[in-house]
Image: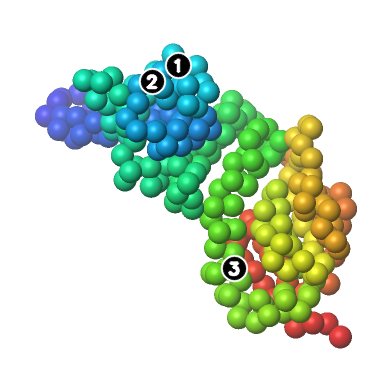
Amino acid sequence: MIATAEMLVDSQKVDAFATRLTGILNSGALALGLSIGHRTGLFDALEALPPATSAQIASHAELDERYVREWLGAMVTGGLVEYDPAGSSYRLPPEHAALLTRRNSPNNLAVAAQFLPVIASVEDRIVDCFREGGGVGYDHFGRFHEVMAEESRQTVVAALFDHILPLAAELPARLRDGIEVADIGCGMGRALIALASEYPNQPKGSMAVRSRPPGERVPSRASSMPGNSWAEANSAPSTRATATRPMAAARCDAVWGSLSRKMSSRAPQQ
């Protein structure tokens, strides 16, 4: 026990908590490495290659060798990649590749690691909110919608036809017949595009509750589908979102809420 001016402190609990905090810090840094490995395609390169040197991996991925070597060192230290000192070669075990590469989607957890740097990018603004109140608008989160769309493609879209739509038992048949569908909180419209590909003759509508970053365009396939319309709502730090082009969701036969991942269907209005 350690005696302080106010209380007795259990030194074993201090040591255990220090170990836990150190693990959190190390894992946090490793999670950023996961994001980098996914975005650069390094996990995919490692899976495609036999045990290879940093120069061979960098050449395959068309990346700078020095940065690849430093990244590999972190991945080896974190136990994600194996290193053979005899041949100075690196290997991604297949059991790890099963959860880290695009080929193994929808089980690619490296996609979700990208959310951590997205959140970290607004830390200063969030600290300001603690002091001054208010909020942080969508437009400050940089790659959020890009990352969300990638995550949705391998989770929501991958499960859309076999698992999500059948939750409303009569909905697949009604979609084939042709009904009005609204996608609320559609992001980049991945689910809507998938629906349009499977049921090409039905009218569809979508609404994204966000501000579009400068230069970003509405997904071309979503906006060009026959009968499809697209509306956005601006989301500012201290204001309520207001639609720039109202969606007539009340007249739709099915409403797809991408934010809550819930689908509702009602009988056609006479």
Amino acid carrying mark 3 in the image: Phe
Q: Disc 2 versus disc 3: distance between alpha carbons? A: 42 Å
Q: Position of residue 135 (x, y in %)?
A: 66, 38
User: Considering the numbered disc 1 on the image, is that residue within a helix, a strand or a loop?
Assistant: helix
- State if disc 1 and disc 3 touch (CB < 8 Å): no
Residue 161, image quadrant: bottom right
Judged left or right of residue 171, residue 270 is right
Amino acid carrying mark 1 in the image: Glu
Q: Residue at x 76, y 79 (%)?
A: 177
Residue 74 shows which numbered tag?
none
**Mark 2 or 3 closer to N-term?**
2
User: Considering the numbered disc 3 on the image, is that residue within a helix, a strand or a loop?
Assistant: helix
Per the image, the residue denoted by label 1 is 65
Residue furthest to the bottom in view is 270
Which mark's residue is nearer the viewer, 3 or 1?
A: 1
> Residue 270: in sight, yes or no?
yes
| Label 3 Cα crowd, 10 Å radius (few <14 / some 14-19 / many 20+) | some
- State if disc 3 and disc 2 touch (CB < 8 Å): no
Position of 191 relative to 254 (above/below):
above
Per the image, the residue denoted by label 2 is 54
Q: Disc 3 versus disc 1: distance between alpha carbons? A: 43 Å
Residue 259, image quadrant: bottom right
Q: Position of residue 50 (x, y in %)?
A: 34, 33
| Label 1 Cα crowd, 10 Å radius (few <14 / some 14-19 / many 20+) | some
**Mark 2 or 1 closer to N-term?**
2
Judged left or right of residue 60, residue 18 is left
Q: Which residue is nearer to you in this view: 50 or 188?
A: 50
Amino acid carrying mark 2 in the image: Ser
